[in-house]
Image (cartoon, rainbow, N blue to C red):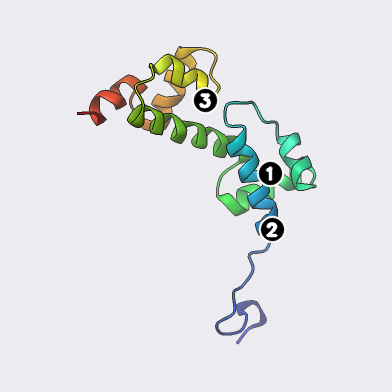
């Protein structure tokens, strides 16, 4: 057996990513501040890494850059609100951090392939 394969039954660590503790800390911060702009520098400071190393480690750990992860989480929250609430699309966009309905609609269309209103119509009875 080669050293990089580890021992049978042992969990091998993924090298180059964020530690589980740092990943949890950063993901929780993003969740708590979904509607806000979060800079790469602020997230890197939270993880106590340089912005460059943080961005690489985050992408390695979560499979996408921090900004994209933040946007996906915002769109997931919007989708949940579209399905589970009767809030107008404009208010949903504002709640997840968009100042303009048009920018929310564009971002949501890129994410889901349909506008927020179309999604709501297709998924409510």
Question: Where 57 sits versus 78, above or below?
Answer: below
Quadrant assignment for the C terminus: top left
Q: Residue at x 72, y 46 (%)?
A: 54
Task: Please state which of the two labelled residues, at mark 2 or mark 3, is closer to the viewer.
Answer: 3
- The numbered mark at residue 17 is none
Quarter of the rendering containing residue 7: bottom right
Task: Please state which of the two labelled residues, at mark 1 or mark 3, is closer to the viewer.
Answer: 3
Image position, residue 83 (x, y; %) = 33, 31
Badge 1 crowding class, 10 Å Cα cut-off, few under 14, some 14 to 19, many 20 or more, is: many
Q: Judging from the image, what secondary structure is the residue with disc 2 in?
A: loop
| View extreme (bottom): residue | 1
Left or right of 55 on screen, residue 78 = left
Do tag 2 and tag 1 residues touch (Cβ < 8 Å)?
no
Q: Judging from the image, what secondary structure is the residue with disc 3 in?
A: loop
- CA gap, disc 2 to disc 1? 13 Å
Quadrant assignment for the N terminus: bottom right
- CA gap, disc 2 to disc 3? 28 Å
Image position, residue 109 (x, y; %) = 39, 25
Q: Residue at x 65, y 58 (%)?
A: 20
- The numbered mark at residue 55 is 1
Quarter of the rendering containing residue 102: top left
Image position, residue 5 (x, y; %) = 60, 79
The disc, 1 or 3, on the residue closer to the chain's N-terminal end is 1
Task: Please state which of the two labelled residues, at mark 2 or mark 1, is closer to the viewer.
Answer: 2
Left or right of 67 on screen, residue 113 = left
Badge 3 crowding class, 10 Å Cα cut-off, few under 14, some 14 to 19, many 20 or more, is: many
- The numbered mark at residue 96 is 3
Do tag 2 and tag 3 residues touch (Cβ < 8 Å)?
no
- CA gap, disc 1 to disc 3? 23 Å
**Which residue is denoted by mark 2 in the rendering?**
19
């Amino acid at each position: 057996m080669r050293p990089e394969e580890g021992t049978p039954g042992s969990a091998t660590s993924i090298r180059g990513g964020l530690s589980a503790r740092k990943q949890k800390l950063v993901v929780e911060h993003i969740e708590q501040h979904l509607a806000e702009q979060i800079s790469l520098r602020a997230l890197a400071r939270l993880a106590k890494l340089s912005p460059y190393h943080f961005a690489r480690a985050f992408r390695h750990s979560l499979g996408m850059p921090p900004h994209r992860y933040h946007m996906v989480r915002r769109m997931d929250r919007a989708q949940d609100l579209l399905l589970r609430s009767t809030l107008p699309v404009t208010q949903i966009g504002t709640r997840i951090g968009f100042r303009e309905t048009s920018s929310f609609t564009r971002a949501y269309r890129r994410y889901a392939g349909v506008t927020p209103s179309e999604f709501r119509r297709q998924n409510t009875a």
